[in-house]
Image (cartoon, rainbow, N blue to C red):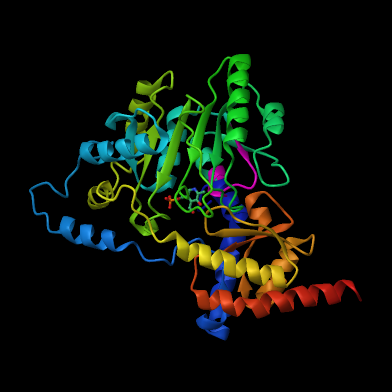
């Protein structure tokens, strides 16, 4: 066998998004890139803020010996201090630099913490809809991802979690603002959720960790706030990155922060630093650490995404689509008029619109639009959304 049988099966199961990508490339070759509205990938199109360019230029001029050398596996201490200070302001917490570990993006942070806490066969629970990579990240470290249904408005269904948590549960992952729904979990829900985690931890006799994946925290609209998790649940950690809020996904820079109130905080920190090293990351990219350390609180212009969201909501409203209005992120989760959302995604494709079926996120019957794309594609998509809806309606009335 040429490759691992597990990876062989992963290649099959992850083929949905790959298939979309390949078919999208084909469509663009036939119809021209400018005529295909590609809403399939969450790759930010807003440029990084001007402060980024300025600081990047300044940092690139540094010729100190060892400036590009190895460093402590957790990252530069001054950068970690700057981030700890920022988190403390945001969450009224009391982190020190030791509680922050620089990582290769949020994906790196998630892998580091999962490797640090999981034993083979441990379960990690997540509410649907969820970021598809979680399943693979858990498996990387011997864990099993279990999905839990959400409420009708994409909130955490706390009662469902209470029923689903067993003594195999090591952690839960939350992602708010959520990819793909754009939902921000309210403080009230999180407090109720924390109560259940505490209760279940004492019933099962093992600590259930709460991993909060927050790469979209700063991309929020209409004054809705993302509650801080550190004050709500002590056994918690945050994984995040500058991929979305500074538009730097290719630079692979983010961090993991451990709640200072966690019972085994220092042990977890030591484990995470070792895991950052032995996963082969060694340390997060040096130049980018120095740059983001000086950009605390800076973000891309969120109004650009708000404008795109509102334009798309207008198009969907005009054509009779039902959807959840995103409170954050740059995704729109739309109810498929056809119960079989893959068939409707195909119909959209025939109308030169590329989206991702909700099944990829554990919620069939929906599809996801990524609107981090040029305004011209959003304008152009109005006709395709209208035609697809008309074609579907005329199909059912025949
Ligand atoms: C919910 C969620 N978590 C994590 C990631 C990974 O982010 P990063 O590029 O920083 O690794 C993404 C990327 O799209 C995401 O949507």
Q: Residue at x 59, y 35 (%)?
A: 144
Measured from the top left, where is residue 124 in percent x and y?
58, 33
Nearer to the camera, 144 or 83: 83
Indicate whether 39 appears above or below 81: below
Name the side, left or right, on which 325 lies relative to 70: right
Indicate whether 319 appears above or below 213: below
Q: Quadrant of residue 28?
A: bottom right
Measured from the top left, where is residue 331 in percent x and y?
57, 59
Examine the structure image and report whether residue 37 is included in the region drawn in magenta.
Answer: no
Name the side, left or right, on which 304 lies relative to 18: left
Measured from the top left, where is residue 379 in percent x and y?
58, 78
Name the side, left or right, on which 139 lies relative to 84: right
Residue furthest to the bottom in view is: 31
Examine the structure image and report whether residue 134 is included in the region drawn in magenta.
Answer: yes
Residue furthest to the front in view is: 223
Query: Is residue 278 something one can see in this rendering?
Result: no
Query: Is residue 53 something one can see in this rendering?
Result: yes
Q: Which residues are magenta?
A: 124-135
Image quadrant containing the C terminus: bottom right
Nearer to the camera, 226 or 48: 226
Q: Quadrant of residue 249?
A: bottom left
Q: Residue at x 38, y 34 (%)?
A: 257
Q: Residue at x 42, y 30 (%)?
A: 116
Q: Residue at x 52, y 62 (%)?
A: 306
Name the side, left or right, on which 95 lies relative to 367: left
Residue furthest to the right in view is: 398
Please give the count of numbered marks on the rendered protein. 0
Measured from the top left, where is residue 247 in percent x and y?
39, 59
């Amino acid at each position: 066998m040429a490759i691992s049988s597990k990876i062989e099966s992963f290649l099959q199961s992850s083929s949905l998004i790959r298939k979309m990508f390949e078919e999208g490339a084909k469509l663009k070759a036939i119809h021209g890139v400018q005529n295909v509205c590609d809403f399939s990938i969450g790759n930010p199109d807003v440029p990084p803020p001007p402060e980024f360019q300025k600081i990047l230029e300044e940092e690139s001029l540094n010729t100190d010996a060892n400036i590009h050398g190895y460093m402590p596996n957790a990252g530069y201490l001054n950068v970690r201090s700057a981030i700890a200070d920022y988190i403390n302001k945001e969450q009224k917490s009391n982190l020190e630099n030791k509680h922050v570990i620089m990582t290769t993006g949020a994906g790196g942070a998630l892998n580091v913490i999962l490797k640090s806490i999981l034993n083979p066969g441990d379960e990690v629970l997540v509410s649907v809809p969820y970021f598809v990579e979680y399943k693979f990240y858990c498996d990387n470290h011997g864990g099993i991802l279990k999905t839990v249904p959400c409420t009708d408005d994409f909130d955490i269904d706390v009662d469902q979690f209470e029923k689903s948590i067993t003594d195999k549960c090591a952690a839960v992952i939350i992602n708010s603002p959520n990819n793909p729904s754009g939902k921000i979990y309210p403080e009230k829900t999180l407090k109720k959720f924390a109560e259940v985690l505490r209760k279940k931890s004492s019933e099962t006799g093992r600590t259930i960790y709460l991993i909060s994946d927050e790469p979209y925290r700063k991309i929020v609209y209409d004054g809705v706030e993302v509650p801080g998790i550190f004050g709500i649940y002590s056994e918690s950690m945050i994984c995040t990155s500058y991929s979305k809020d500074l538009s730097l996904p290719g630079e692979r820079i983010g961090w993991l922060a451990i709640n200072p109130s966690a019972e085994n905080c220092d042990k977890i920190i030591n484990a995470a630093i070792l895991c950052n090293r032995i996963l082969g990351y060694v340390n997060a990219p040096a130049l980018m650490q120095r740059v983001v350390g000086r950009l605390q609180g800076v973000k891309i212009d969120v109004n650009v995404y708000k404008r795109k969201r509102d334009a798309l909501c207008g198009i969907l409203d005009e054509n009779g689509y039902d959807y959840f209005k995103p409170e954050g992120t740059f995704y729109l989760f739309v109810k498929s008029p056809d119960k079989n959302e893959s068939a409707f995604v195909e119909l959209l494709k025939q109308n030169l619109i590329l989206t991702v079926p909700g099944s990829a996120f554990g919620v069939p019957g929906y599809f996801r639009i990524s609107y981090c794309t040029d305004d011209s594609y959003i304008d152009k998509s109005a006709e395709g959304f209208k035609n697809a809806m008309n074609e579907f309606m005329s199909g059912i009335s025949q």
